[in-house]
Protein backbone atom coordinates (compact mmCIF):
# COMPACT_ATOMS: atom_id res chain seq x y z
CA UNK A 1 0.00 0.00 0.00
CA UNK A 2 2.73 2.43 0.92
CA UNK A 3 4.40 2.03 -2.45
CA UNK A 4 1.18 2.35 -4.45
CA UNK A 5 -0.17 5.41 -2.64
CA UNK A 6 2.94 7.26 -1.49
CA UNK A 7 6.24 6.11 -2.98
CA UNK A 8 5.41 5.06 -6.53
CA UNK A 9 6.77 7.59 -9.06
CA UNK A 10 3.28 7.89 -10.59
CA UNK A 11 1.82 8.69 -7.15
CA UNK A 12 4.62 11.18 -6.44
CA UNK A 13 3.71 12.96 -9.69
CA UNK A 14 0.29 13.60 -8.13
CA UNK A 15 1.38 14.49 -4.59
CA UNK A 16 3.92 17.11 -5.68
CA UNK A 17 1.52 19.33 -7.67
CA UNK A 18 -1.16 18.88 -4.99
CA UNK A 19 1.32 20.34 -2.49
CA UNK A 20 2.70 22.95 -4.91
CA UNK A 21 -0.80 24.30 -5.55
CA UNK A 22 -1.60 24.30 -1.81
CA UNK A 23 -4.42 21.80 -2.24
CA UNK A 24 -2.90 19.65 0.50
CA UNK A 25 -0.58 21.08 3.15
CA UNK A 26 3.04 21.65 2.11
CA UNK A 27 4.08 20.18 5.44
CA UNK A 28 2.25 16.93 4.73
CA UNK A 29 4.87 14.24 5.17
CA UNK A 30 4.49 10.68 4.05
CA UNK A 31 8.18 9.92 3.60
CA UNK A 32 8.55 8.13 6.91
CA UNK A 33 5.25 6.27 6.75
CA UNK A 34 5.45 2.49 6.76
CA UNK A 35 1.80 2.06 7.65
CA UNK A 36 -0.90 3.98 5.79
CA UNK A 37 -3.71 3.40 8.33
CA UNK A 38 -1.46 4.72 11.11
CA UNK A 39 -0.35 7.66 8.93
CA UNK A 40 -3.99 8.55 8.19
CA UNK A 41 -4.92 8.28 11.85
CA UNK A 42 -2.11 10.63 12.83
CA UNK A 43 -2.98 12.99 10.00
CA UNK A 44 -6.64 13.14 11.00
CA UNK A 45 -5.80 14.12 14.57
CA UNK A 46 -3.21 16.71 13.54
CA UNK A 47 -4.82 18.44 10.55
CA UNK A 48 -8.00 20.31 9.88
CA UNK A 49 -10.88 18.39 8.37
CA UNK A 50 -10.66 19.84 4.84
CA UNK A 51 -7.03 18.82 4.21
CA UNK A 52 -7.81 15.34 5.57
CA UNK A 53 -10.78 15.10 3.21
CA UNK A 54 -8.50 16.10 0.36
CA UNK A 55 -5.87 13.52 1.27
CA UNK A 56 -8.49 10.77 1.29
CA UNK A 57 -9.85 11.95 -2.08
CA UNK A 58 -6.32 11.97 -3.47
CA UNK A 59 -5.67 8.42 -2.25
CA UNK A 60 -8.94 7.28 -3.84
CA UNK A 61 -8.05 8.96 -7.11
CA UNK A 62 -4.60 7.36 -7.13
CA UNK A 63 -6.33 3.99 -6.62
CA UNK A 64 -8.69 4.67 -9.54
CA UNK A 65 -5.77 5.66 -11.77
CA UNK A 66 -3.89 2.50 -10.79
CA UNK A 67 -6.92 0.38 -11.70
CA UNK A 68 -7.21 2.13 -15.07
CA UNK A 69 -3.55 1.36 -15.76
CA UNK A 70 -3.89 -2.31 -14.78
CA UNK A 71 -7.31 -3.14 -16.20
CA UNK A 72 -7.69 -0.70 -19.10
CA UNK A 73 -4.05 -0.40 -20.11
CA UNK A 74 -4.22 3.40 -19.76
CA UNK A 75 -1.24 5.60 -19.11
CA UNK A 76 -1.26 7.33 -15.73
CA UNK A 77 -1.89 11.06 -16.03
CA UNK A 78 -1.12 13.02 -12.88
CA UNK A 79 -3.24 16.01 -13.89
CA UNK A 80 -6.31 13.84 -14.48
CA UNK A 81 -5.71 12.07 -11.15
CA UNK A 82 -5.49 15.39 -9.29
CA UNK A 83 -8.57 16.81 -11.03
CA UNK A 84 -10.56 13.66 -10.18
CA UNK A 85 -9.53 14.03 -6.54
CA UNK A 86 -10.55 17.69 -6.46
CA UNK A 87 -13.94 16.90 -7.96
CA UNK A 88 -14.54 14.01 -5.54
CA UNK A 89 -13.56 16.15 -2.56
CA UNK A 90 -15.83 19.01 -3.61
CA UNK A 91 -18.75 16.67 -4.27
CA UNK A 92 -18.29 14.94 -0.92
CA UNK A 93 -18.28 18.26 0.94
CA UNK A 94 -21.38 19.49 -0.90
CA UNK A 95 -23.32 16.29 -0.28
CA UNK A 96 -22.45 16.18 3.42
CA UNK A 97 -23.40 19.80 3.98
CA UNK A 98 -26.79 19.19 2.40
CA UNK A 99 -27.68 16.35 4.76
Image (spheres, rainbow, N blue to C red):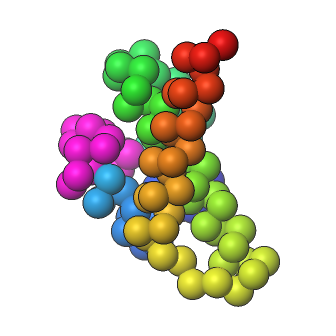
Is the magenta region chiefly helix, strand or loop?
loop
Extreme-right residue of the structure: 71
Viewer-closest of 14 and 88: 88
Name the spot of residue 55 as percent of width and height, x first: 46, 40
Viewer-closest of 60 and 89: 89
Name the spot of residue 24 as percent of width and height, x first: 32, 41
Q: Quadrant of residue 74?
A: bottom right
How many marks do you count on the picture?
Answer: 0
Say if 69 sits above or below 63 in the image.
Answer: below
Residue 23 painted magenta = yes
Name the spot of residue 36 as percent of width and height, x first: 55, 41
Evaluate whether residue 35 shows in this view: no
Say if 49 sits above or below 8 in the image.
Answer: above
Specify start and end residues of the magenta stretch as a single range: 19-32
Evaluate whether residue 92 shows in this view: yes
* Residue 65 placement, left or right of 78: right
Name the spot of residue 75 as percent of width and height, x first: 57, 84
Amino acid sequence: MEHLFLRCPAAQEVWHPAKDHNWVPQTLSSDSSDNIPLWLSLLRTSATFVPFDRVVALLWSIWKTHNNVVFRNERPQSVITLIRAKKASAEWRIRHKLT
